[in-house]
Image (cartoon, grey):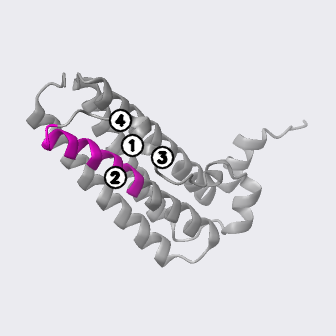
Amino acid sequence: MNTTSITSIQEALKTAIDMEIKGCAFYKEVAGTYKDSLTKDIFDGLAADEVLHRKAIETYYNSIREHRGLPPLSSVLSGEPERDRSIFSRSFDELAGAIGAGTDVTEAYKTGMELEKTGYDYYEKILNTAKDREIKELFRFLLKEENQHYTLLARTYGYLTRPQDTFDDEEKPFFEG
């Protein structure tokens, strides 16, 4: 293993595990609190992703702790069931039908965006300091996931707080005049 320091990488992985656990708990709580289909689907999906992330990070953490070689990311993720990613591509027509604008779930979306941004920033810092190819691969994967989550939350938040602006951005209306 060619990592900066085994202890600092172990500590970074442990912190990452804790972040994923906290994110999962938050997303499960939100999914259980709000009953509209959009919020429930989004936050259930995010919670499931956080579990996947935690398991992947734990695999690397345990490999380092037990002085085993680091596995390639593909082998860590290969046993995982295929996740339904359709929530990431729902149209705004579907959003409009699933939840009403102005609902009080906006704070949950804002908090979720903050969690994803914090995770992204932390994972980017680790990626930039790690030397080991497998550790870098793990954190590139996590960065991509955090970015997808943030984008989903931000798009939905935008719809909930400014539905007409979101429609204009997505549909590019033609104005006559």
Q: Of helix, strand and loop, which one carries label 4?
A: helix
- Amino acid type at image mark 4: Leu
Sooner in the amino-acid sequence: mark 1 or mark 3: 1
Q: Which x, y percent locates residue 30? A: 45, 70
Q: Which residue is mark 1?
A: 76
Sooner in the amino-acid sequence: mark 2 or mark 4: 2
- Labels 3 & 4 near each other (Cβ < 8 A): no
Please state which of the two labelled residues, at mark 3 or mark 4, is closer to the viewer.
4
Residue 136 occupies which quadrant of the picture?
top left
- Amino acid type at image mark 1: Val
- Labels 4 & 1 near each other (Cβ < 8 A): yes
- Amino acid type at image mark 2: Lys
Q: Categorize mark 4 by other alpha carbons within 10 Å: few (<14), some (14-19), many (20+).
A: many
Disc 3/disc 4 C-alpha distance (Å)? 18 Å
- Amino acid type at image mark 3: Tyr
- Magenta segment boundaries in residue numbering: 51-67
Please state which of the two labelled residues, at mark 1 or mark 2, is closer to the viewer.
1
Visible residue check, residue 143: no
- Up the image or down, 136 lies above or below 17; here it is above
Disc 2/disc 4 C-alpha distance (Å)? 12 Å
- Labels 1 & 2 near each other (Cβ < 8 A): yes
Sooner in the amino-acid sequence: mark 4 or mark 1: 1
- Dominant secondary structure of the magenta stretch? helix
Disc 1/disc 3 C-alpha distance (Å)? 24 Å
Q: Which residue is mark 3?
A: 150
Q: Which x, y percent locates residue 129? A: 22, 25
Q: Categorize mark 2 by other alpha carbons within 10 Å: few (<14), some (14-19), many (20+).
A: some
